[in-house]
Amino acid sequence: MNTRSTWLAGALAFVAGGVHWAVCSAIVGGEGWDGAIYYATLPLVAVACAALGALAPKRPWRLGAAAASAQAAGLVLTAGTGASMLPVGLALLAILGGGLALCAWAGAWLGRRAGLGRG
């Protein structure tokens, strides 16, 4: 994959994470992960990261970081003035980003084996 495709994959992962947070926040009426819908739909973000990793296998960890970064931005925007738990939330999103990065890495590995991406 060329540099443009790698950046596009990162941007799509960022959008996937942001849309996930925004939709869950709108449904719940607060922070996205306050409702069960967040956890029920989180595998969709993981699958998106894996698919993007298969198509753009160069440094796939960035895809998980991009998706988690978008959710962290959403957390900061929805935390409001009572943000005393914000550091804990950001730490949890860092852990989530690690899991999403693993999914992207697995997708990249599978993509290379299938001959989908070059990287």
Image (tube, grey):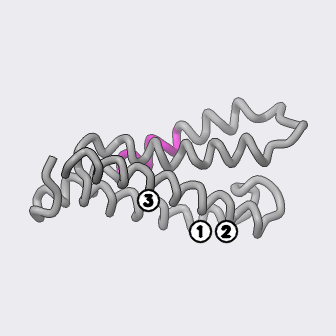
Residue matched to label 2: 37
Compared to residue 48, the image places residue 14 above or below, namely: above
Amino acid under disc 3: Ala
| Residue 8 image position (x, y, % from top left) | 37, 54
- First along the sequence among labels 1 and 3: 1
Question: For residue 13, what is the image quadrant?
Answer: bottom left
| Residue 25 image position (x, y, % from top left) | 74, 60
Res 40 label: 1
| Residue 88 image position (x, y, % from top left) | 69, 33
Q: Main secondary structure of the magenta part?
A: helix
Residue matched to label 3: 46
Residue 83 is a magenta residue: no
SS at circle 1: helix
Q: How many marks?
A: 3
Q: Which residues lie in the magenta part?
A: 95-103
Side of 53 where 24 appears, left or right: right
